[in-house]
Image (cartoon, grey):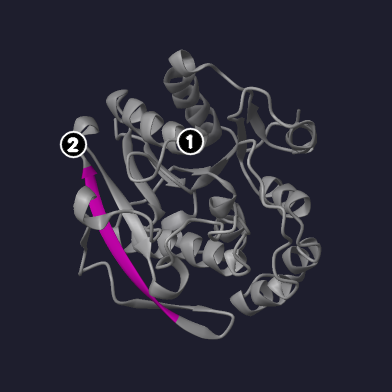
């Protein structure tokens, strides 16, 4: 039987960035899923505070060189890779000087969220999909960690849905207690329209607050996983309202087995109304 393929797309991952709830889970879970018999790939942004020399990142020339157009502007896509030797897995990094060269992640030195995080998220998600196509690797499930990866559900369901490479791909979004407190650019819906999204998506995204964007991300997901033990009540309410398969929080020691089984359910079932 052919191995099921799980693509992990994460906002952050250790040891390349400091440990956090997302970074730790995104490091541990792919290893466990791979050791359990599934095939994996892992993608993350190449934020400027990742030490390339220490972690031995190197560019993958055959995958780089593409330009992605975001809001009518060309942005070169650079792909780098590094190994996590203890886990026998590789991590692919989506890089671009304009979006990811700055020496921080989603906030600046003052702790303020970057005003272009919407475009960074768009570039990241599209960059992952285009790179996976170049690799010739068809994922059964894309598992997203962190809001910067959350637009993946929209791209797969509304823009790449006619692409044979992703025709049967399901999207699972893990919900954490992390948010942004600065609305995305008011022109974000226009940028989505330029991308080719239909009026339904554009209208859904007219409110660019974290709450609304999260709700829309969940709307297009095939599965939701609660990844924080005491999830914020407003986020939990969104999960409860969503019309898809759901997996409530499970402790670390049981997480790999439960999530592997959850991926199987998402692959096999079209939709479960809860």
234 to the left or right of 63: right
Above-or-below relation of 34 to 84 = above
Residue drawn where x is 32% and y is 23% of the image: 36
Q: Quadrant of residue 204?
A: bottom right
Q: Which residues are magenta?
A: 75-83
Residue 80 lies in the magenta stretch: yes
Position of the N terminus by quadrant: top left
Residue drawn where x is 50% and y is 37% of the image: 22
Of labels 1 and 2, earlier in sequence is 1
Question: Percent position (x, y) of residue 192?
Answer: 66, 72
Residue drawn where x is 59% and y is 80% of the image: 71
123 to the left or right of 194: left
71 to the left or right of 138: right
Above-or-below relation of 207 to 71 = above
Above-or-below relation of 97 to 141 = below
Question: Percent position (x, y) of residue 87?
Answer: 24, 31
Say the numbered circle drawn on residue 20.
Answer: 1
- Residue nearest the observer in this picture, 15 or 258: 15
Q: Quadrant of residue 243?
A: top right
Dominant secondary structure of the residues highlighted in magenta in the image:
strand
Residue 219 lies in the magenta stretch: no
Quick one: label 2, few (<14), some, or many (20+) residues within 10 Å? few
Disc 2 designates what residue? 85
Q: Quadrant of residue 31?
A: top left
Q: Is disc 1 placed on a helix, strand or loop?
A: loop
Q: CA distance from mark 1 to mark 2?
A: 20 Å
- Residue nearest the observer in this picture, 205 or 265: 205
Question: Percent position (x, y) of residue 262?
Answer: 52, 26
């Amino acid at each position: 039987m052919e191995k099921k393929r799980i693509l992990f797309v994460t906002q952050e991952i250790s040891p390349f960035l400091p440990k956090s709830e997302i970074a730790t889970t995104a490091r541990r879970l792919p290893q466990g899923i791979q050791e359990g018999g599934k095939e994996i790939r892992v993608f993350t942004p190449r934020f400027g505070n990742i030490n390339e020399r220490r972690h031995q990142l190197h560019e993958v020339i055959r995958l780089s060189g593409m330009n992605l157009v975001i809001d009518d502007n060309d942005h070169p896509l650079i792909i780098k890779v590094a190994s996590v030797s203890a886990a026998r897995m590789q991590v692919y990094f989506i890089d671009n000087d304009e979006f990811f060269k700055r020496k921080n992640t989603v906030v600046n030195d003052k702790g303020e969220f970057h005003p272009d995080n919407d475009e960074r998220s768009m570039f990241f998600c599209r960059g992952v999909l285009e790179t996976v196509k170049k690799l010739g690797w068809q994922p059964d499930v894309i598992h997203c960690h962190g809001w910067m990866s959350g637009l993946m559900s929209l791209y797969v369901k509304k823009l790449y849905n006619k692409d044979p490479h992703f025709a049967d791909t399901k999207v699972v979004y893990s919900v954490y207690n992390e948010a942004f407190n600065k609305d995305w650019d008011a022109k974000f819906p226009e940028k989505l329209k330029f991308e080719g999204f239909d009026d339904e998506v554009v209208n859904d995204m007219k409110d660019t607050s974290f709450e609304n964007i999260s709700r829309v991300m969940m709307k297009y997901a095939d599965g939701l996983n609660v990844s924080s033990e005491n999830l914020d009540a407003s986020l939990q309410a969104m999960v409860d309202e969503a019309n898809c398969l759901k997996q409530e929080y499970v402790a670390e020691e049981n997480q790999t087995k439960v999530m592997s089984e959850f991926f199987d359910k998402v692959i096999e079932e079209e939709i479960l109304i809860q």
